[in-house]
């Protein structure tokens, strides 16, 4: 009888810090397994490579030819005195995750309100909680916790929706800057279609308050190095022509600026938009008419699209935030991601909390995978299925493109900001790495489908260590 084949002797990584924390802006060299997305079709895995980050947090080299961090330091100019971080056998470096659509004020409602459809959910859950942020102290409490949770879950960039309140929205921007999260933020604009007093006085007030937020964000982060403003009409069914026109003027006056809005989420929402904005051939034509459609426009959902919508979206190079979890929870429908990609439309993933119940982009990847598979079940056509390579792309580079940040983040290309995660799949958590995994791709798949915040040991934004379990534990165990 032949001997049973035993897995190689992997030992669980210890959860203690793997580097003596350097000064935040010292040059750094990572050495170990490095994984990122090259294209929709290709994940690049370096089993052993060095990544050099300069003192501004910018990636200066990715070198697979060296055998150690010390060799990389000796070889690369300016890195002789760099802090070195050598990853453990079951760790890898991965680009920061990008959440292209999240509602900050809805955070306390996560996992609640799944009984109704979009309309019922808005009336019973969303309008009341959003209206409550007239109390700015609530924003201080909730946003502080939420931003840290987002970072711990690996979301280094988030496109946030806020509430109608400029002061609470400014608190959100301040909080992202304070905790070092890259963010796109705007004040929500609503005049009609809402309940529980969750609307603004008139178009003039709404535009004025959005302007206040844009000015605040440009004052606290003049270079736009972390926090970027956006204009935020909630959806076509909430913003009548006079306000949409005012927001178009604000866009032109502040260009380049981002736009974040909802589009084509349910058939009823599309019908309500047409009722409020008579005469347009499509939802996309309406936004385009007001000048709000361009390469910096982020559109949540885009489920019930017409051929004309697709045509205008592709021509204007807008991006789509695909919120698979939320779309399932509210029974909105299936976003046809394959069709968007085939038309060359940018797609990223969003959590859309609290319509979605998880702030994790790992969860968003799983849900996007499942929705694409349901489309295959429904139609019998296997082409709807998203491949693993595509899921990884959507969560990182695709998100960067949708946020118009593809030259800044999304992968480890030289010249980009170092937004990254140290992932560890060898810990006591739900990831069952036990040595049978055939290759490094298997480790990545285990993390994506089984991992959570416990496996995210370090989170870097722009080269700065901002979160991660190692940071939390070293705080817990250090003497004050
Ligand atoms: N449509 C308009 N507002 C919202 C929102 O807050 N969440 C979702 N899922 N859809 C919306
Ligand atoms: Fe949303």
Image (tube, rainbow, N blue to C red):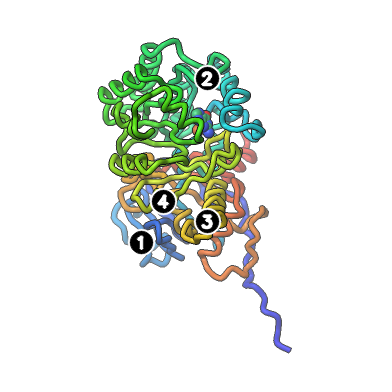
Q: Is residue 327 visible?
A: yes
Residue at the spot x=33%, y=55% of the render?
Answer: 61
Measure the C-alpha gap from mark 3 to mark 1: 45 Å
Q: Is residue 156 visible?
A: no
First in residue order: circle 3 vs circle 1:
1
Name the image quarter holding the N terminus: bottom right
| Secondary structure category for the residue under label 1 | strand
Badge 4, how many Cα within 10 Å: few under 14, some, many 20+? few
Question: Looking at the rendered structure, which numbered label has been put on residue 194?
Answer: 2
Measure the C-alpha gap from mark 2 to mark 4: 32 Å
Which residue is labeled 4 in the image? 339
| Secondary structure category for the residue under label 2 | loop
Residue 96 at what x, y percent from top left? 46, 46
Measure the C-alpha gap from mark 2 to mark 3: 36 Å
Task: Give whichever of 270, 114 is nearer the camera.
Answer: 270
Badge 2, how many Cα within 10 Å: few under 14, some, many 20+? some
Question: Looking at the rendered structure, which numbered label has been put on residue 63?
Answer: 1
Residue 157 at what x, y percent from top left? 44, 39
Q: Is residue 193 above or below residue 462?
A: above
Measure the C-alpha gap from mark 1 to mark 2: 54 Å
Q: Is residue 333 above or below residue 168?
A: below
First in residue order: circle 2 vs circle 3:
2
Please identify the quarter of the rendering in which residue 237 is found. Answer: top left
Please identify the quarter of the rendering in which residue 378 is found. Answer: bottom right
Which residue is labeled 3 in the image? 379
Residue at the spot x=46%, y=65% of the render?
Answer: 47
Foreground tag (3 vs 1): 3
């Amino acid at each position: 009888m032949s001997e049973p084949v035993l897995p190689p002797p992997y030992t669980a990584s210890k959860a203690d810090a793997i580097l003596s924390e350097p000064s935040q802006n010292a040059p750094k060299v990572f050495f170990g397994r490095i994984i990122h997305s090259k294209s929709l079709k290709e994940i690049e895995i370096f089993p052993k490579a060095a990544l050099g980050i300069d003192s501004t947090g910018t990636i200066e080299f990715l070198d697979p030819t060296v055998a150690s961090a010390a060799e990389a330091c000796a070889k690369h100019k300016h890195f002789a005195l760099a802090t070195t971080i050598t990853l453990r056998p079951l760790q890898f470096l991965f680009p920061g995750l990008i959440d292209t659509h999240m509602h900050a004020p809805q955070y306390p409602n996560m996992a609640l309100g799944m009984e109704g459809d979009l309309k019922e959910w808005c009336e019973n859950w969303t309008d009341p909680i959003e209206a409550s942020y007239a109390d700015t102290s609530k924003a201080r409490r909730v946003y502080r916790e939420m931003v840290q949770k987002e970072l711990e879950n690996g979301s280094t960039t988030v496109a946030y929706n806020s509430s109608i309140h400029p002061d609470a929205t400014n608190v959100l921007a301040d909080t992202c800057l304070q905790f070092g999260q890259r963010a796109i933020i705007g004040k929500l604009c609503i005049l009609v279609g809402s309940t529980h007093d969750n609307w603004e006085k008139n178009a003039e007030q709404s535009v004025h308050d959005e302007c206040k937020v844009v000015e605040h964000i440009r004052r606290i982060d003049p270079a736009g190095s972390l926090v970027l403003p956006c204009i935020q009409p909630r959806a076509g069914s909430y913003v009548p022509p006079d306000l949409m026109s005012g927001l178009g003027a604000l866009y032109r006056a502040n260009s380049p600026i981002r736009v974040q809005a909802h589009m084509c989420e349910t058939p009823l929402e599309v019908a309500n938009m047409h009722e409020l904005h008579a005469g347009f051939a499509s939802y996309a034509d309406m936004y385009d008419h007001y000048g709000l459609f361009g390469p910096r426009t982020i559109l949540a959902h885009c489920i019930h699209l017409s051929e004309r919508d697709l045509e205008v979206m592709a021509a204007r190079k807008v991006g789509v935030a695909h919120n698979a979890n939320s779309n399932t929870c509210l029974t909105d429908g299936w976003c046809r991601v394959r069709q968007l990609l085939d038309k060359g439309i940018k797609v990223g993933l969003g959590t859309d909390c609290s319509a979605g119940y998880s702030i994790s982009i790992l969860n968003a990847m799983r849900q996007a995978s499942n929705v694409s598979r349901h489309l295959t079940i429904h139609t019998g056509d296997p082409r709807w299925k998203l491949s693993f390579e595509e899921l990884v792309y959507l969560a990182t580079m695709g998100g960067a493109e949708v946020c118009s940040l593809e030259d800044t983040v999304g992968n480890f290309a030289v010249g980009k900001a170092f937004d990254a995660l140290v992932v560890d799949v060898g810990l006591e958590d739900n990831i069952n790495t036990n040595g049978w995994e055939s290759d490094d791709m298997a480790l990545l798949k285990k993390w994506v489908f089984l991992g959570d915040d416990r496996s995210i040991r370090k989170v870097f934004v722009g080269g700065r260590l901002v979160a991660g379990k190692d940071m939390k534990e070293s705080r817990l165990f250090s003497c004050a």
